[in-house]
Amino acid sequence: MKAKKITISFLAFCLASLCCGCQETPQEVRERMNSYGENKQMASQERTYCTVAELKEAKLPDADMGLDNIILPQGVDFSEIENIAILSLSFEENYTENKDEAIDLFEIDKHSLTSDTFDEERNMGRTVIYDSPAHEKYLAVEDNGFVSFISGLTYDYINGKAHYGSTLEKYDLQAEDISGRKVELADGEADIAKVRESAEKWLNEKMPMKGCEYHISDAYVRELDSTGEKKKQLSFYAEVLCGGMRFNSYASKEPADNAQVDFYMHGIQLNYDGSGQMSFFSNGVGKINVDSRQEIKEVIDLRSAIQLMNEEMSGFSELKITKILPMYVLYPQYKTDEELYSVPGQKIEGRPVYAFLIAEGTDDTEFGINKSNAYKVIFVDMVTGEVTTNIG
């Protein structure tokens, strides 16, 4: 199979499964959408503010807030916040000129490299591709910093030699203790927590992001059929944390014509066939750099954010908030109407928000981890109070 063909088909596959795989909106959400905007918002109460230190100690307000249709979770934990800022971000440029970094990292034979370009009409830049069926390794490096590595069982799956069986286990590592949980991998029984720890260390050492760190937030155990033999694979999703605040990994908002996105998810996908056998790496749609930070000393407090969310969503039926997380949402700063989200050098603004997450649906993808299949979101900007949602 030609390298260019593999790249295009694989990228289309990744975008479909990781970014655009949301299930059909449930009927109750559609009903909410129909009534959204038909009811006048409640008069906004005066906003109150708090320092970052105070936010770290925040608790859910008392139940006397008079919420219309909102059920809050049992509690919140903002203690990991170190600082809050408005982030100026950008995608990498001319990253293929540094392709040797990825080639060496994934132990690729340089003599087997072939060069190719695609999506020139969309200004997506250059791509360098390596594909070796004999060694069962594949690597793609793009100018915007996108890196995708495939080997082992994942290589067989992408090429139709292995087939998805089932997802045996799913772990939300923010809420679940996986101490003592084991999985039988290619090199024997593995402790999931130890593989996670090793993967986080590898990411932070080998793929560092200045001013940020990686934290694996989710783990899936899948079973695949490879030439008649059942094999297990461990999949991880790694979030980016900046000052204790995670980048949004729960939702994207894309128009029906798949043109310019309003906001997008960002994280790292990993597969392990063995405790030390990575068979898949992808940094989403590219490598993002933190160019500068505008530190924020005070933010809208949690009580005011809940009230703003309640007012904005008052036209909906009951909304059960599963969890509330502080995070950064990435908003592209387009120069033209044609510019796409992840073009090399694309500017992005990372804005701090309260994320109200609603568990609806199931992530039943065969490949990767896509939390947007399982959640709807409501974001309240910590600075402006603006409310945005992907409901409808």
Image (spheres, helix red, strand yellow):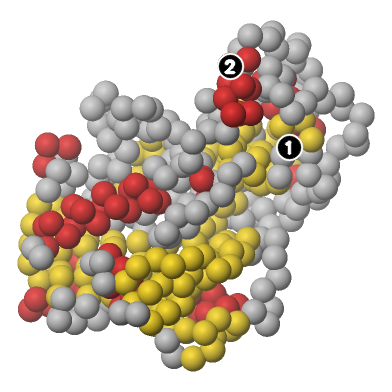
Check the image and report above or below for 144 versus 268.
Answer: above
> Which of the two discs, 2 and 1, labels the residue nearer the N terminus?
2
Which residue is nearer to you in this view: 37 or 189?
189
Position in image of residue 281 (x %, y %): 36, 67
Label 2 crowd (10 A; few <14 / some 14-19 / many >=20): few
Position in image of residue 329 (x %, y %): 51, 40
User: Which numbered marker is on residue 311?
Assistant: none
Camera sees residue 331:
yes
**Type of residue at label 2?**
Asn
Labels 2, 1: front one = 2
Label 1 crowd (10 A; few <14 / some 14-19 / many >=20): some
Question: Do the residues bearing badges 2 and 1 touch, measured as CB atoms within 8 Å?
Answer: no
Residue at the spot of label 1:
320
Q: At 69% across and 78% down in the image, what residue appears?
A: 179
Position in image of residue 349 (x %, y %): 44, 38
**Type of residue at label 1?**
Lys
Q: At 51% across and 46% down in the image, what residue appears?
A: 373
Residue at the spot of label 2:
34
From the viewer's perspective, is 173 left or right of 166?
Answer: right
How far separated are the C-alphas under marks 2 and 1? 18 Å
From the viewer's perspective, is 321 left or right of 291?
Answer: right
Helix, strand or loop at label 2? It is helix
Check the image and report above or below for 157 versus 289.
Answer: below
Which residue is nearer to you in this view: 215 or 298?
215
Q: At 25% across and 31% down in the image, what residue appears?
A: 339
Q: At 63% across and 61% down in the image, what residue appears?
A: 172
Which quarter of the figure has residue 21?
top left
Which residue is nearer to you in this view: 120 or 52?
120
